[in-house]
């Protein structure tokens, strides 16, 4: 123990790789999923490799109160209690599926083992695959599930995932995402997740470290970072807010379900989750319009009273508006500059947010 | 008498197989770390080492044999060393032939293994290190099995190349029955003595042997390529 708080990652790395310079300093909670988010070439994979010890950068790294790297020492990768899932599953071609899974397990001291092979196999839906001889006979999604399981079987104190979905086609992605969400919900392992997909991040992450050109440009809770007007994220085509809500009443006649959150409620297409379950929904900025008066006679079901918290003009036809809904929830709205002028929108103005569509994330 | 093999011929065949086996075994121990280093090092002098290893490919065997003879002779660096250590002299001995053959066949062992290590790449080793495998563990549990096709090629080439060696042996080992008279030298002797029948028998055997070796190589590399994909 080094006096560092538990359940936190503190990292500082400086690395020059040819033309590319990485210079990052950040702290993140080692609970839940922390996304390292940024465009390609922003250094997120390099950062993850530094954390794993696969890349040797100058700096320091504390994980869960343990020193992995400082001026005096630099633990080699195999001495760090981590799991790493690469972009490509990278299963060992000379080993069977079972031997792949056992590779890390057998090298983990018995006292450190927290999970059993059968548990993980069942949990990741691999029962019918485990006795396959050649891992090359698996589909892309199956291979990646084996890779995730293989990493989990070393009972890591932190799981590092480098765009584990990016090499997969859409169908395989949809196949594996539920397992990753399950990981998030049920397994108490902190995850560092590298991604350049806002959609994935919105689905999986709790905390977000945004990167650009080898530097960290923002670091904070997902909900806050996703809606910060001063960051490039708010300007993405699929920018939007994430709402954690609770499943409320059903309207069986219209196949609708009400989701309640601190700032109000939203109706969405019927969900499978039982009453009281927590779900995550995403509301895209382009699906939120603003009315200064309550819009009677609108076809839009979800109309929420809101207060303008920020306005940022990105271009002549693109304005991002930050809306406070209730006490702790925010929404992003994308409107045109003309609407901004016509409606005389200013910070502090009370308005109504019309939400055209809500996407359930889990 | 003309068309038969006498015990001396069989002794030459046996000696050749023994030389090739011992040489191949030594080569595996020398070539593996060398190939690993060549595959992974980024040192500036890597090119020079690679060229040195490949030198026996282009040098006439007699040149290599000549220098080895000087080096291992009574006034050579290695020769004085072996004398000082009471190990005797290497030229005109089986041990000397092994040393010469190892150097002569070095590129044939190093290059396939090096290619196999390079084809495997760093990723499987990185994966292994994230799965708690230390560096020796990674080498034996991942790098070696993945480089298997390269090792098989190296073994076959080194063995066959040693069987076929002539120039180095003649320079370094001479023609001592049971000690340094290998098959290729034996054939040469028979031809010199105009015993074409016996020479025919031995030479034909060599042709057949070489063909079988190459055929095996062709089939195993084809089959084993699948493993490394």
Image (cartoon, coloured by chain):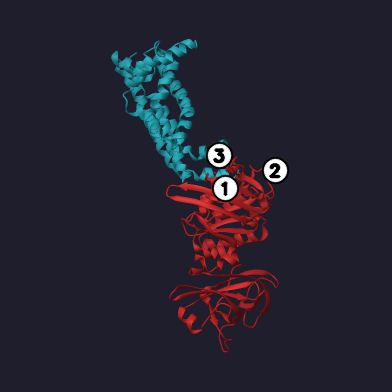
Mark 1 nearby-residue class (10 Å; few <14, some 14–19, many ≥20): many
According to the colouring, which chain is red? A
Are the residues flagged by discs 1 and 3 from a single subunit?
A: no
Q: In the depicted view, which residue is nearer to us: B43 or A57?
A: A57
Vertical comparison of A222 with B108: above or below: below
Q: Chain of mark 3?
A: B
In the drawing, what numbered circle is on residue A110? 2
In the rendered image, residue B169, in percent from the top left (x then y), is placed at 37, 18
Residue that badge 3 annotates? B138
In the rendered image, residue B153, in percent from the top left (x then y), is placed at 43, 34
Mark 3 nearby-residue class (10 Å; few <14, some 14–19, many ≥20): some
Residue A149 visible? The answer is no
Screen quadrant of the N terminus of chain B: top left
**Separation of marks 3 and 2 at Cα, in angstroms:** 20 Å
Q: Nearer the viewer, mark 1 or mark 3?
A: 1
Q: Chain of mark 1?
A: A
Task: Please state the total of marks drawn on the protein image.
Answer: 3
In the drawing, what numbered circle is on residue A52? 1
Q: Specify whether B100 is left or right of A124.
A: left
Q: Which residue shows up at 54% across the image and 51% down it?
A: A48
Secondary structure category for the residue under label 2: helix
């Amino acid at each position: 123990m080094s006096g560092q708080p538990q359940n936190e990652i503190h990292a500082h790395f400086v690395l020059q790789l040819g033309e590319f310079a990485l210079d990052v300093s950040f702290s993140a909670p080692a609970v839940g999923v922390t996304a390292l988010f940024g465009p390609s070439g922003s250094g997120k994979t390099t950062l993850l490799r530094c954390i794993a010890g696969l890349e040797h950068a100058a700096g320091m790294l504390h994980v869960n109160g343990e020193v992995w790297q400082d001026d005096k020492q630099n633990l080699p990768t195999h001495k760090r209690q981590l799991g790493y899932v690469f972009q490509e599953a990278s299963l060992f071609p000379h080993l069977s599926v079972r031997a792949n899974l056992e590779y890390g397990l057998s090298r983990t001291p018995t006292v450190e083992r927290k999970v059993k092979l059968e548990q993980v196999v069942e949990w990741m839906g691999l029962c019918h695959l485990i006795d396959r001889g050649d891992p090359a006979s698996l589909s892309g999604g199956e291979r990646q599930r084996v890779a995730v399981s293989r990493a989990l079987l070393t009972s890591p104190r932190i799981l590092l995932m480098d765009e584990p979905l990016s090499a997969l086609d859409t169908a395989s992605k949809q196949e594996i995402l539920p397992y990753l969400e399950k990981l998030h919900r049920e397994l108490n392992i902190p995850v560092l997740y590298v991604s350049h997909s806002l959609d994935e991040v919105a689905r999986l992450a709790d905390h977000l470290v945004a990167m650009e050109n080898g530097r960290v440009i923002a670091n904070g809770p997902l909900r806050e970072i996703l809606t910060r007007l001063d960051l490039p994220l708010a300007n993405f085509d699929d920018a939007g807010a994430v709402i954690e809500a609770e499943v409320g009443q059903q309207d069986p006649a219209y196949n609708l379900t009400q989701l309640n959150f601190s700032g109000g409620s939203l109706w969405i297409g019927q969900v499978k989750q039982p009453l009281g379950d927590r779900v995550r929904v995403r509301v895209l900025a382009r699906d939120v319009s603003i009315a200064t008066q309550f819009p009677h006679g609108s076809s839009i079901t979800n109309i929420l009273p809101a207060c303008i918290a920020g306005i940022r003009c990105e271009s002549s036809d693109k304005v991002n508006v930050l809306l406070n809904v209730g006490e702790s929830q925010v929404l992003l709205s994308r409107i045109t500059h003309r609407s901004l002028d016509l409606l005389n929108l200013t910070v502090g103005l009370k308005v109504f947010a019309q939400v055209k569509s809500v996407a359930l994330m889990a | 008498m003309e068309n038969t093999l006498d015990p001396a011929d069989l002794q030459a065949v046996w000696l050749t197989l023994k030389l090739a086996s011992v040489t191949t075994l030594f080569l595996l121990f020398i070539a593996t770390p060398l190939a690993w280093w060549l595959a992974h090092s980024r040192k500036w002098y890597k090119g020079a080492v690679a060229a040195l290893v490949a030198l026996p490919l282009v040098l006439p065997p007699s040149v290599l044999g000549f220098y080895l003879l000087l080096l291992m002779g009574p006034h050579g660096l290695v020769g004085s060393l072996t004398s000082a250590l009471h190990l005797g002299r290497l030229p005109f001995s089986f041990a000397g032939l092994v040393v010469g053959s190892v150097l002569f066949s070095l590129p044939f062992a190093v290059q396939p293994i090096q290619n196999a290590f390079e084809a495997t790449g760093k990723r499987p080793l990185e994966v292994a290190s994230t799965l708690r495998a230390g560096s020796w563990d990674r080498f034996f549990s991942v790098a070696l099995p993945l480089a298997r096709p390269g090792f098989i090629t190296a073994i076959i080439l080194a063995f066959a190349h040693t069987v076929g060696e002539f120039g180095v042996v003649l320079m370094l080992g001479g023609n001592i029955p049971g000690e340094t008279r290998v098959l290729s030298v034996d054939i040469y002797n028979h031809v010199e003595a105009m015993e074409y029948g016996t020479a025919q028998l031995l030479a034909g055997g060599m042709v057949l042997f070489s063909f079988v070796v190459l055929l095996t190589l062709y089939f195993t590399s084809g089959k084993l390529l699948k493993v490394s994909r």
